[in-house]
Image: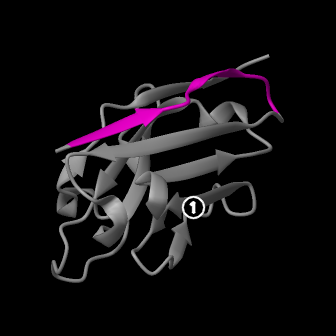
Amino acid sequence: VQLQASGGGLVQPGGSLRLSCAASGFSLNIYDVAWFRQAPGKGREGVSFINSNRLKHYADSVKGRFTISRDNAKNTVYLQMNSMKLEDTAVYYCATLPPLGAPVRWDYEAAYEYWGQGTLVTVSS
């Protein structure tokens, strides 16, 4: 069971990146998936969430700029990041909630079971 986050890199303010979270060893289709990020010197925070029925949530700081989606055929969840800002600089992680788990707030980090290794996103001019 493995989650692989990829797509990070260096981007200028106002630019775009698309992150991918690919699952191997299990079907991601039945899992609720979230993206978290951790900026230098700060705690990890929830960025966006998509459940198995494609219900979505976003942190206020990224609403209107980021879009989460999933492609079940590719066993992958994506995070499209547009109009990026300096404050989006962070290591981004994807994570899954256990199926049939107790209802929790989508950004409750401790509830997430599997985590990807993180991909670094740097926004800089």
Q: Is residue 11 magenta?
A: yes
Q: Which residue is depicted at the point 45% across and 28% down?
A: 119
Locate residue 106, reporting x and y percent. 37, 70
Count of labels in the image: 1
71, above or below 32, in the image: above
Above or below 61: residue 7: above
Which amino acid type corresponds to the residue marked 1 in the rendered image?
A: Ser
Is 61 or 24 nearer to us in this picture? 24
- The span shown in magenta is 2-13
Q: Is residue 3 above or below residue 78?
A: above
In the image, taking residue 69 as reference, residue 80 lies left or right, namely right
Which residue bears the numbered disc 1? 69
Q: Nearer the viewer, residue 56 or 86?
A: 56
Quadrant of the rendering where the N terminus is positioned: top left
Q: Crowding at label 1, few (<14), some or many (≥20) Cα neighbours within 10 Å? A: some
Q: Is residue 68 left or right of residue 120?
A: right
- Find residue 2 and report its image quarter: top left
Is residue 87 in view? Answer: yes
Front-lying residue, 110 or 82: 82
Q: Residue at x 78, y 23 (%)?
A: 12
Q: Horizontal placement of 31 versus 76: left or right?
A: left
Confirm whether the magenta stretch covers residue 31.
Answer: no
In the rendered view, would you say 74 is above or below 92? below
List the single residue furthest toward the right. Answer: 14
- Determine the residue positioned at 72% across, 19% down: 124
Prevailing secondary structure of the magenta residues? strand
Residue at point 50%, 31% (across, down): 90
